Amino acid sequence: VSNKSRMSANDAAEQLSALDLNLKEIDEETAGKVFESIKGLKQVKDVVVFNTEGKALHATMDLPEKEIVELTTLYTDKKTALQKAITLKGERHEVHRFFAKEGLIYGRLGKGSKDSIGAALIKNFSNVIVLVTYGFPYLSARVLPLVRKELSKF
């Protein structure tokens, strides 16, 4: 990973920590329980739990380290999230919604047809981000409240 992308990830992590005053930190064991809980939702296609430095902790899909580091930078600001998109395995999931205060960024690959895939980043913890993907017939309006409900248990 280049110093430039690592620097931007560190910058994003610092900015995130300023927003995280009310978010609790979780340990690696709890991150594993979070992963298992989210993975168990039938509406979720894939889940990746990673730390704010961009290291994958648990995953149902293999993502290049560089992509995970880039995902942490999406929380920098709305402009960054819209420009970079949620890129998974080289495919851009265009960001449609950015809610910094709620720790929520989500978008979609495709035009909303049966073969399009939704992707969301959820930051409920100060040191861990959860990525989920979902497909037809599930939409963000259904999936994200379910994921947030599961995350609230930790």
Image (tube, rainbow, N blue to C red):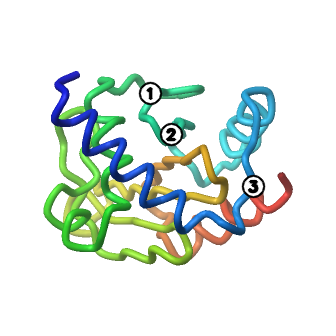
Of tags 3 and 1, which is closer to the observer?
3
Q: Residues within 10 Å of mark 3 (few under 14, many from 20)?
A: few
The answer to whether the residues at label 3 and label 1 have Cβ atoms under 8 Å apart is no
Callout 2: SS: strand
CA–CA distance in space, label 1 to label 2: 7 Å
Q: Amino acid at mark 3?
A: Lys
In the rendering, at what x and y percent does residue 25 appear? 72, 47
Which residue, given by chain and number where applicable, does mark 3 sit on? 24
The residue drawn where x is 61% and y is 63% is 20
In the rendering, at what x and y percent does residue 103 appear? 52, 67
User: Toward the viewer: 124 or 21?
Assistant: 21
Tag on residue 61? Answer: 1
The residue drawn where x is 44% and y is 49% is 13
Tag on residue 46? Answer: 2
The residue drawn where x is 58% and y is 67% is 144
User: Please, is residue 27 above or below residue 143 in the view?
Assistant: above
